[in-house]
Amino acid sequence: MKILIMGGVAGGMAAATRLRRLDEDAEIVVFEAGPYVSFANCGLPYYLGDVITDRDTLISHSPESFGNRFQIDVKLHHEVTAIDPATKAVTVHDHAAGTDSTHSYDALIIAAGATANLPVALASPRTLTLRTIDDMDRIHAILDEPGTESVVIVGGGFIGLEAAENIRHRGFATTIIQRGAQLFPLLDPEMVAPLAAELVEHGVTIRTGTQVRRIDGDVVTLSDGSTIRAQLVIDSTGIAPNASIAAAAGLRIGDTGGIWVDPRHRTSNPFIYAVGDVAEKTDLVSGTATLVALAGLANRHGRAVADVIAGTPDDAVPSLGTSIIGVFGVTAASTGWNETRLRASGRAHRIIHVHPASHATYYPGGSILAIKLLVDPATDLILGAQVVGRDGVDKRIDVLAVAISAGITASKLKNLELAYAPQYASAKDPVNIAGYVAENTASGLVPTVQWHEVDALAEAGATILDVRTAAEFERGRIPGALNIPLDEIRDRASEIPAGSVIVHCQVGQRGNTATRILTQAGHLVTNLDGGYLTWVAGT
Ligand code: FAD
């Protein structure tokens, strides 16, 4: 059996090596258009920041290493330029030799990845993308030039923020331009606030709600008319799947622009498969086609497509898009859908915010986490989660991602038996606490309102009751709030006006207790979900 693979990085090489382990006799040829095989693209930003100083660690694989161990024929500088499904052959251009050749296949795997978008307004000799080792080298060289002082990064998504952190880390003036109203739209606005604050704290300038209109020399002109001088512009506005050759071959392309595949990674042609950034995935929440450009998925689907071809197939597990980013001291992670997306699609959802300590408060080094759950009110299944903080974020998001995949409901998070010692967690893990609140909300025991509902409810006559201490109240409050500390609430309940009451504390826990006390005393009470902390972050 002869298997050709187009693209030799995450998806392509995962498929190639798994195929060899399953079939010692198969002929496996990988055509890679670029100069490197299986390089570590996720590490590129950290080389720019001199966090990774040994460039070779990013390119530790070679055609020889795959040849010796796996008998895989990796051909660098070989670009597949056409696929002919009728004759089951590809045309390949050898950039080194300048020649073209034709190669037949029994199975073809397309793992060609994606290419960075380059909006017309960004086209300039100073604009670079960050996708390949060559891109990284070019950016690194410009940063090393004596005249380089200022860098503009266009796009506040993953690559933009990682580039910004690393470039600022080396002392350059760094500005992020973000077209939308908020940075990093994977997170909801109140969750992204600590990330944005951390960037600003470290000297990164963030310009939202504007875009680059044109670049003349080292002058970047924005749509609001202002200008920024920059010796380097990094375009991180997004990517598009490298699906044009597949499209030219008549393969079905999905509405997302990625190659359509069935659950076993087969394209519309039975002998051609596609994995990684070039291919559509199935979204776990909606069941519809989506694009998710993440290394874990590319690797998993690369391995899975080898199983399909070798005859031990398993259907692909739909994607949640679980991801994580760290900038300076803050880590932000998400899985599934966020509130913005749920609202835009009109899908019903319940929201839970909690702010537990990352580990026992009496043990040094912990900090406060922000956890947000989006829950289907009809089934109590978790539709998405976000976690932001300085410590223990990765562990919580992974537990929540597993819970979503395994169909564990939000209320049942309270039952998860998670590892605990004071330096790692609390006896009630933050995930358990999210489960307690989810259960209280689902059962109607403690009805909640969201930070963005407070203004309208107050205008309609609701009393905002702050049950924190007088000292906390003095440090910052919701305008118009009445302060009765929780410990005095039974004695001073007569001071609370009749009608609807929104109770809040710092994070929601004392508000929960106050809500129960006042509800049982006959008041009409809701608790502000996530408390003052969430309200402040969102407003
Ligand atoms: P790619 O890795 O893009 O590889 C595709 C290869 O195909 C390329 O080398 C290309 O040269 C080759 N090719 C294209 N067309 C042809 C052709 N016609 N013929 C032959 N070869 C061709 N993901 C995470 O999960 N976590 C991270 O922290 C993370 N950080 C990232 C940081 C950066 C800077 C970048 C760029 C990406 C990051 N990603 C991260 C995303 C992750 O790297 C990708 O999702 C993953 O590499 C996709 O693998 P792939 O095999 O589909 O495509």
Image (cartoon, helix red, strand yellow):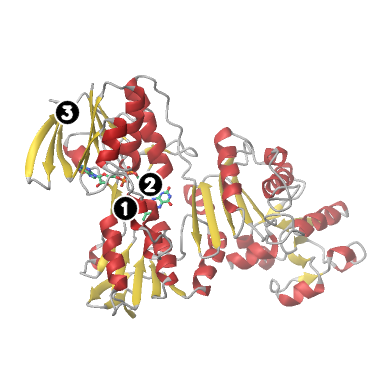
Q: Is mark 1 within 8 Å of ligand 1?
A: yes
Q: Which residue is mark 3?
A: 85
In the image, is residue 480 above or below residue 456?
Answer: below
Check disc 3 and report its element: helix, strand or loop. loop
Residue 115, can we see it? yes
Q: Which residue is mark 1?
A: 239
Residue 10 in percent (x, y) is at: 35, 42
Q: Which residue is mark 2?
A: 293
Q: Is mark 2 within 8 Å of ligand 1?
A: yes
Residue 224's image quarter? bottom left
Contact (Cβ within 8 Å) of mark 1 with mark 2: yes
Kind of residue at badge 3: Pro
Query: Residue reaching furthest right?
Result: 491
Query: Residue reaching furthest left?
Result: 99
In the rendered structure, which disc, 3 or 1, sits on the residue that comes first in sequence? Answer: 3
The alpha-carbon separation of the residues under discs 2 and 3 comes to 26 Å
Which residue is depicted at the point 30% across and 22% down?
A: 24
In the rendered structure, which disc, 2 or 3, sits on the residue that comes first in sequence? Answer: 3
Count of numbered circles in the view: 3
Which residue is at the front of the view, 106 or 485? 106
Check disc 2 and report its element: helix, strand or loop. loop
The alpha-carbon separation of the residues under discs 3 and 1 comes to 27 Å
262 sits left or right of 100 in the view: right
